[in-house]
Amino acid sequence: MSDLNENKEQAPVKMSGRPPKGARVPMKINKNTVKRVMSYLKPFSGQLVLVVVCILVSSGASVASSLFLKTLIDDYILPLVGVDNPDYGGLLRAILMMGLLFLAGAVAALCYSRIMAGVSQGVLKKIRDQMFSHMQTLPINYFDTHTHGDVMSFYTNDTDAMQQMLSQAIPQVISSAVTIITVFCSMLSLSVWLTLTVVVFLVFIMMITTTVAGRAGKYFVRQQSSVANINGYIEEMINGQRVVKIFCREEKSKEAFDGKNVDLCENMCKANTYANILMPINNALGYLLYVILAIIGGALAINEVPNVACFAVNILTLGSIASFLQLSRSFVGPIGQVSQQLNAVAMAMAGAERIFTLIDEEPEVDDGYVTLVNAKRVNGELTETAERTGLWAWKHPHSADGSVTYTELKGNVVLDDVDFGYVPEKTVLHNIKIYAEPGQKVAFVGATGAGKTTITNLINRFYDIADGKIRYDGININKIKKADLRRSLGIVLQDVNLFTGTVMDNLRYGKPDATDEDCINAAKLANADGFIRMLPDGYNTVLTGGGSGLSQGQRQLLSIARAAVADPPVMILDEATSSIDTRTEAIVQAGMDALMKGRTVFVIAHRLSTVKNSDVIMVLDKGRIIERGSHDKLIAEKGQYYRLYTGAFELE
């Protein structure tokens, strides 16, 4: 809002989601966050059961193939050694059996990967829908205090981290956990002595893995915050690129970006360094364990040491040793995978916590119960009607007896002793008294920061007043539903926002049921019809990038035409003609006068020639109304307005 430019020292300060430099980022995963993430998986419980079944099949096939290696060597390969006419039929059947086991495991892994991809996208769709829906309920103050890039990071980086966790990390962790348990039991069935060796060595592996994984997770969490911070800065620089070039701030902008980029680079480098060395470390330790087991197993077999297994006591065979060595590789690998995937889980939970922070933001409070309806007169009485008649009424429901009364919307706006501050300790508006009669044109003039736009924001209830009353047709605006209040107000802002779509779509943005004829007439009224017809496809020309192909003046004309299409009872014009040249302004002003006819209009203008014909002119200074009256009256008083108008004192 332009109001933020008026009161920079008072307006809320935009914040990013990044923790202060040097602050300790907690690695402990919030249990409530985990529970909330899991709650999104409940609708997919059937698919998740199938995923677990597929994981069990995949892990079981992997373990079974390792165990089958003992049978293959001892029962099918060794008996064929030294035989003159070996029969390979049994060996081929055994190899085929192993192939089927591998195939079953591969198919199961493919199935659970595909299912989890669908589940993860379904969960993220629901989260994005919830985020966007909730974002629409947040007050303007939220967007004034958070950079747009930081908000966008919720929908990109944070949801991407969650997608990685749901589609890959969680299935991998479950698969690895199942594999570790089944492999451990299988190793016990082959040799307790060798299993004890693995357990002792496992303590050493876990100490190293926990240390490395903990460091990686810490920097992954910091990385998420750094990404949000740099996104906010990039978005700010893109929006202000013209200003950057005007003031030759390219080098300073690059320096500031470099600082943020270095911070992100450091966090990403450290996070990925620790994450990437984890697997090689585990592989190296796995090979070391492999060698140790081969030596111990060979020594036990050569010396015919009794081998204690779960179900028997025997001598270690070549097949048992080969099978155990294969199982040891299957045992160490998943431990490293679990540690690595836990980093992804920690990063996703950091993103989820940020997302839930947005979802948990307090929505805009609306205790209003008076609504705005189309009305018509039947036998002199106001009656609600579905069609648009041009007559509006406030609908008052009475809870006591269930009756309803209607008050005609006339556009009488009163501000009585209004005080306001963006923060409680600093008041920026003091004792504002305004009485706008139906059909009056009320103008606000004054230096930047005087509080002009703040007043119009209070009428819209973008912010709530600290003290005093604002009444609309005698109704306290706190009793009017915000959507209905804002529907009764047409606003033309200095900063124009055009949306991706055709010119016609933008014109009927405030009144979706408007006909093409309504839009064309409104464009003619605002003097926009001429340039619109010169566009490649006229009214069907698609605008992108906020109408970047149009001049600032043309965008302003479309904004005025859009307000004319909505045809609201009350108009607020915030520097509506500031971007239009003097010649065009004279033409547009005539159309604006026609648009304002019969409406209550609030005008904010620095160009005093645009407010000469106002019924009442309010001169503001430092949040106070210091003069009020018609143009002629204020000129005759030779006060501040006189000095502004004659150039003895210029607006800042």
Image: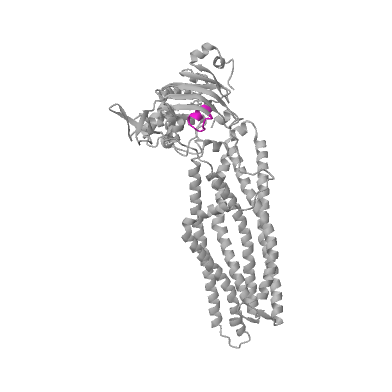
Spot occupied by residue 259 in the image (x, y as percentages of width and height): 68, 42
Image position of 67 with respect to 467: above or below: below
Residue name at image x 66 percent, y 39 percent:
256
Can residue 553 be spotted in the picture? no
564 relative position to 465: left or right? left
The front one of 120 and 483 is: 483
In this rendering, the count of numbered labels is 0
Can residue 331 be spotted in the picture? yes
The front one of 455 and 301 is: 455
Q: Residue furthest top?
A: 636
586 relative position to 626: left or right? left
Spot occupied by residue 634 in the image (x, y as percentages of width and height): 51, 14
Image position of 266 with respect to 119: above or below: above
Residue name at image x 63 percent, y 44 percent:
18
Spot occupied by residue 89 in the image (x, y as percentages of width and height): 54, 82
158 relative position to 308: left or right? left
Residue name at image x 52 percent, y 73 percent:
100
Q: Residue furthest front?
A: 400
Spot occupied by residue 544 in the image (x, y as percentages of width and height): 49, 39
Instruction: Write the start and end of the magenta stretch as one range.
Output: 453-466
Q: Does 464 lie within the magenta span?
A: yes
268 relative position to 411: left or right? right
The front one of 337 and 315 is: 315
